[in-house]
Image: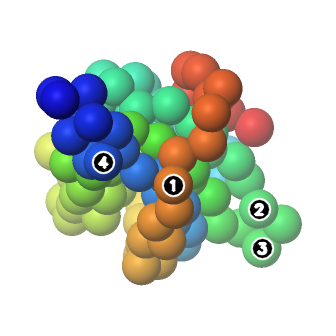
């Protein structure tokens, strides 16, 4: 029964981060925080200068990652400068996603 409850709490979240977030180690930092939170997924640069973050795992861990992405000033030594984080888009987690990678 605990497994069903755990699965119900799992989500796939997509957010876009704006600011000076490319070329400053931001994707590496995001990967490290996501792994610490037990999340899988990726962070990738977009052509318009944002970083797309896709994370799967516990809803509470995704919420904590958003908090860290938005936190100002950053207490977690986040590189660059974040000027905004989009409203998260939530979906069902995808099977077969392992690790958290920089793309």
**Secondary structure category for the residue under label 2:** loop
From mark 1 to mark 2, how far is it between C-alphas? 23 Å
| Residues under numbered marks 3 and 2 in contact, where contact means CB atoms less than 8 Å apart | yes
Question: What colour scheme does the image use?
Answer: rainbow
Q: Which residue is mark 4?
A: 8
From the viewer's perspective, is 79 left or right of 15? Answer: left
Q: Which residue is mark 3?
A: 48
Q: Nearer the viewer, residue 29 or 20?
A: 29
| Quarter that holds the N terminus | top left
Tell me residue 9's x, y (percent): 27, 47
Q: Is residue 15 above or below residue 65?
A: below
At x 76% / y 62%, what residue is drawn?
Answer: 46
At x 34% / y 25%, what residue is drawn?
Answer: 38
Q: Is residue 56 above or below residue 86?
A: above
From mark 4 to mark 2, how far is it between C-alphas? 31 Å
Of badges 3 and 4, the one in the foreground is: 4
Tell me residue 47's x, y (percent): 83, 66
Image disc number at residue 46: 2
From mark 4 to mark 1, how far is it between C-alphas? 9 Å
From mark 3 to mark 2, how far is it between C-alphas? 5 Å
From mark 3 to mark 4, how far is it between C-alphas? 34 Å
**Secondary structure category for the residue under label 3:** loop
| Residues under numbered marks 1 and 2 in contact, where contact means CB atoms less than 8 Å apart | no
**Secondary structure category for the residue under label 1:** loop
């Amino acid at each position: 029964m605990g497994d069903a409850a755990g699965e119900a709490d799992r989500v796939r979240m997509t957010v876009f981060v704006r600011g000076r977030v490319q070329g400053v180690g931001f994707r590496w930092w995001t990967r490290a925080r996501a792994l610490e939170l037990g999340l899988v997924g990726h962070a990738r640069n977009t052509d318009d200068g944002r970083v797309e973050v896709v994370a799967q795992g516990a809803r509470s861990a995704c919420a904590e990652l958003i908090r860290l992405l938005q936190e100002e000033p950053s207490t977690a030594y986040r590189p660059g400068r974040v000027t905004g984080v989009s409203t998260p888009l939530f979906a069902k987690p995808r099977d077969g996603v392992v690790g958290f990678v920089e793309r």
